[in-house]
Image (cartoon, rainbow, N blue to C red):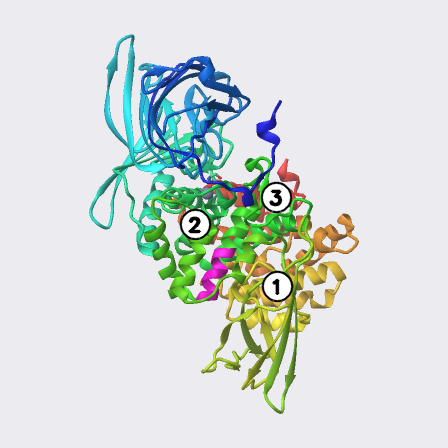
Amino acid sequence: MRDAETATVRLSEYTPPAYLIDEVALVISLEPEATLVAARSHVRRTGDTPAPLVLNGERLELQSIAIDGTLLTTDKYQLEPGKLIILDPPVQFRLDIVTRISPATNTHLEGLYMSAGRFCTQCEAEGFRAITYMLDRPDVLARYAVRIEADKAAYPTLLSNGNMTESGDMEGDRHFAVWVDPHPKPSYLFALCAGEYESIHDTFVTKSGRIVALGIYVDPGDSERARYAMDSLKRAMKWDEEAFQREYDLDLFNIVAVRDFNFGAMENKGLNIFNSSLILADAETATDADFEAIEAVVGHEYFHNWTGNRITCRDWFQLCLKEGLTVYREQEFSADQRSRPVQRIKDVKRLRARQFGEDAGPLAHPVRPSSYQKIDNFYTATVYEKGGEVIRMLKRLIGADAFARGMQLYFERRDGTASTVEDFIACFEEASGQDLSGFMNWYDQAGTPALTARGSYDDEARTYCLTVSQLTQPTPGQTEKNSLPIPLHIGLIATDGARLRTTVEGESAPREEHALVLSDARTTFNFANVEAPPIPAILRHFSAPVTLNDGLTIEQRLSQMAHDPDPFTRWEAGQSIARAIMLSGADMHASALAAALGRELDRAQEDPAFAALALRMPDLSELILAAPMPDPEALFGARETLRREVATELRARLEAIARAKGDASFSPDAGAAGLRALKSAALDLLASLGEEAGDVFEIAFATAANMTEAVAALEALGASGSPAFD
Ligand code: SER
Ligand code: ZN
């Protein structure tokens, strides 16, 4: 009987908890197969009428229950699947529950379990209930004090949330540590780790001068490979102070790397737990992409301290409140650490690859779903990545200043609470003075809006009318779709590349780029002072998570590629041209595309990582999705033909890049990684020439000074069909 798991939970049926728990004191006596958990909670009823107390619990062996020191007899409570019901509790009381669990045989990777002989936890979303009986819901915030006891030799390090206040030896070769977290938190942020680790330590001084001790705990022998994670953490802490005025709030911040971990990482208060793959890296074992991911995820989990932990979610429907916002913050962090245009393009590629498919398929769901059976199934690209895009659009719609004011208002007003998307949006309505009720549709409506844009130029009046329409296809359970407010960042250039300064109704001064909003199903924007027939870029910076049919010709896109000031638009134009050539055999443009890519190589020193992205043709999988009647073999052939043509035309320059010696001393920073990315892209393109390319791949492999270069050379060697690959 799995009633507790299969019942549908609905947002519309949210009810506040009948009881609150303000304080939890845990004594956890660790034994792999028989861990005892003694939980003492201070419980109080919220309403006036008596009600049973219903606690969540899974896979627990109940040992005893006491209220205010008196053991409960079995007629005073009921055990049901997933629940412990205390029938007639007082209004306010001290609850003592002792349970027994077996971490060693817990294969759920949820609750308290063991990985490589060490104890660790994962409690989001509903794992705490596998540790003890609890009001295991995010709107119950408690202060936790945790005493961990364990065998001293086997588990020399004992970690939990907050600050360690006491530790010492016990009888029987055991020892203990007491951890107190002063910040009220929901149970899903509880964490415990115990075992033998190697660790590295550092400090961070906050902007108000407090010293925070930082530690990263890893498997013995691995600690040197955690240096980049530590460096990323310090940069993230600094960045959050500068970009969002957020200071860290405990004396300690620890990260533990765990081999068996279902999520990438988890933001437990003061004790982040990571999958080892997102902590450990060095030049010999990790590529630049790995370093980049470590920086991003370390940042992400750290940023949750404010967006997720200090302000948490009222219920799991509000997951995007913490995840979308934190993804946005993580993306901004990465953009500031690296190349902003490249970050944006990578984020867009990821969104299109993962989220657009979700929106188009049977599992389409809104950023904030309205019902679920298992919340575990909603840790999706829609909640995370589209959730991040929604925040980005909010900033575009109300402007950067109002957005910054709204964020500060949110941090002040909602600190220490379990909040909703409505609470969040209210701060931005107040900061901007705008009615954002229409914007809420972005949270509650599934599907990717499809935009169509067509313009007409009047060369006598020097005006340009651009009509843009939106349509969102029905998704399962949502047949009627509303029009959404869609931010459009529009810029017009002339065929020769001149940036046209124009005015749109409602704007006072002429501009090169206009921040406009499509609110209705269809709107015509009238541009004046348009001095030449324009080529419109309608979605500069990818200003909204939509698809766009703009009807531009390949010639117009070639002009965009050469001249549009927005790197995203230039990249997008190149990709569209390549796609058109590969899908419809418009080979006569291949040479022009090669020339345009040559111009990106000319300016590659400005941003080598961008040039590297520009050189990469759309993947086969993307072509298969875009083709009306996909024939994978033919598409593969068309792709290779175009790559060969481009490589042939750019050969001398690509070879110069591919043969350039890398820096002997490895640095994982963005500048050095950008140069390596360009070299990898050059090798990849040259591979299309096959054996004609000569010894360039072998030499690149033989001289590779790090994993990134070695992998790129090996891939190119394989793709080129060279016998040396064997
Ligand atoms: N809350 C965790 C994270 O966002 C699990 O996904 O990293
Ligand atoms: Zn997260």
**SS of the residue under disc 2:** helix
Q: Is residue 214 left or right of residue 556?
A: left
From mark 1 to mark 3, how far is it between C-alphas?
50 Å
Mark 3 highlights which residue? Answer: 717
**SS of the residue under disc 3:** helix
The quarter of the rendered structure image containing the N terminus is top right
Q: Amino acid at mark 2?
A: Glu
Residue at the farthest left position: 209
**SS of the residue under disc 1:** loop
What residue do we see at 65% from left, 43% from top?
Answer: 722
- Locate residue 174, reporting x and y percent: 30, 13
From mark 2 to mark 1, how far is it between C-alphas?
29 Å
Give the magenta-colored segment's residue range.
390-398
- Locate residue 641, reporting x and y percent: 71, 56
- Locate residue 640, reporting x and y percent: 70, 53
- Point out which mark residue 483 bears: 1
Q: Are marks 1 and 3 in contact (CB under 8 Å)?
A: no
Image height of 620 relative to 316, above or below: below
The quarter of the rendered structure image containing the C terminus is top right
Q: First in sequence: mark 1 or mark 3?
A: 1
From mark 2 to mark 3, how far is it between C-alphas?
35 Å
